[in-house]
Image (cartoon, rainbow, N blue to C red):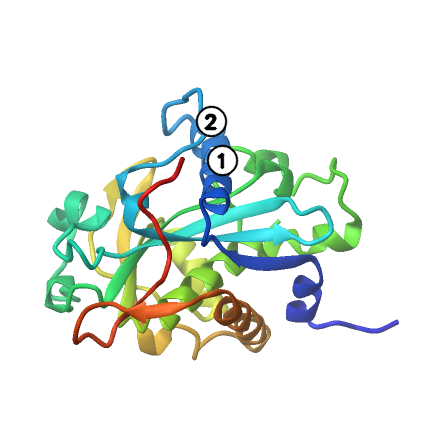
Amino acid sequence: MTKYSIAENFNQYFKIRFADTKTLRQEAFKIRYGVYSSELGWEPENDQEMEFDECDDYAYHCLLEHRRTGVFAGCIRLIIPPPYAPDTKLPFEANCLQSANKEVFDTTTLPRGSFGEISRLAVLASFRRREKEKNIPFVLNNVNPETIYSEDERRNFPNIAIGLYLGGIALASLLKHQGMVVMMEPRLNRRLKRFGLPFQQIGEPMDYHGQRAMFYLAEKDFHKELTEPLEELYTIIHKDMVEQMKLVKYGKDSAFNIPDVDLSSHF
């Protein structure tokens, strides 16, 4: 029996999708609604059964598709200031700068458009294994076995969240970003470090659906410290993203790029 690597096995069952159409973005909003509104109650319910906010007007979304069924297992977004309004604040700038430790790292020194914020990572409940994990937005370890999925497929479910993170990082890399900011729990950061993603804490913990803090990942650390199996997975995801994206100049004389995608309408 052929023994596949983590990356090869994961790639057999899942594919990263760049949400370059209204339909695909709505799939991300539906996943977010299922997790953040219906399941967690963090966001209000609505008749459209989609969770979205003003940041989605200048955010780029990735989905993870289960190849055999075509079901989208999870989503993540990268928010960047739009070229027509480069001074637009990212969520952490609008809500969390008071907790920033500028002696560690000062994001205000970065050129606008050269960095973004990763947020709204969510994984469908059907792709999570353990009962006690049904009320958290994603997991990095273990998915309810009472599903239509085979045992081989379910072995890959623990990697869904890290696959989405790698998709967001690949997107930031293709956009030539200097770094990215994430609001997350310190314990999640410790897990990501074990995978080779050395996010640096740049803010004091604050209470927002639990203790969360600002973390920054510089471009030099996007994937160079990944463990060997995850570096292989990142290479596959990065290649998939390259094949799906068209890039245009961020500004008249800028070196930064943004995807050539119409984000003006979600519906």
Q: Extreme right residue here?
A: 1
- Looking at the rendered image, the quarter that the N terminus falls into is bottom right
Q: Is residue 186 left or right of residue 167?
A: left
Screen quadrant of the C terminus = top left
The image shows residue 100, relative to residue 53, as above or below, that is: below
Helix, strand or loop for disc 2: loop
Q: Relative to 230, is 202 above or below?
A: above
Disc sitting over residue 30 in the figure: 1
The disc labelled 1 sits on which kind of residue? Lys
Whether residue 209 can be seen here: yes
Q: Is residue 216 visible?
A: no
Tell me how far mark 2 sits from mark 1, CA to CA: 6 Å
Other-residue count near label 2 (Cα within 10 Å), few / some / many at <14 / 14–19 / ≥20: some
- Tell me where residue 119 appears, x and y as whole percent: 36, 49
Q: Which quadrant of the view contains residue 113?
A: bottom left
Characterize the local packing of mark 1: few (<14), some (14-19) or many (20 or more) Cα atoms within 10 angstroms: many
Q: Quick one: label 2 or label 1, which is nearer the N terminus?
A: 1
Q: Label 2 belongs to which residue?
A: 49
Residue 101: x %, y % from top left: 14, 59
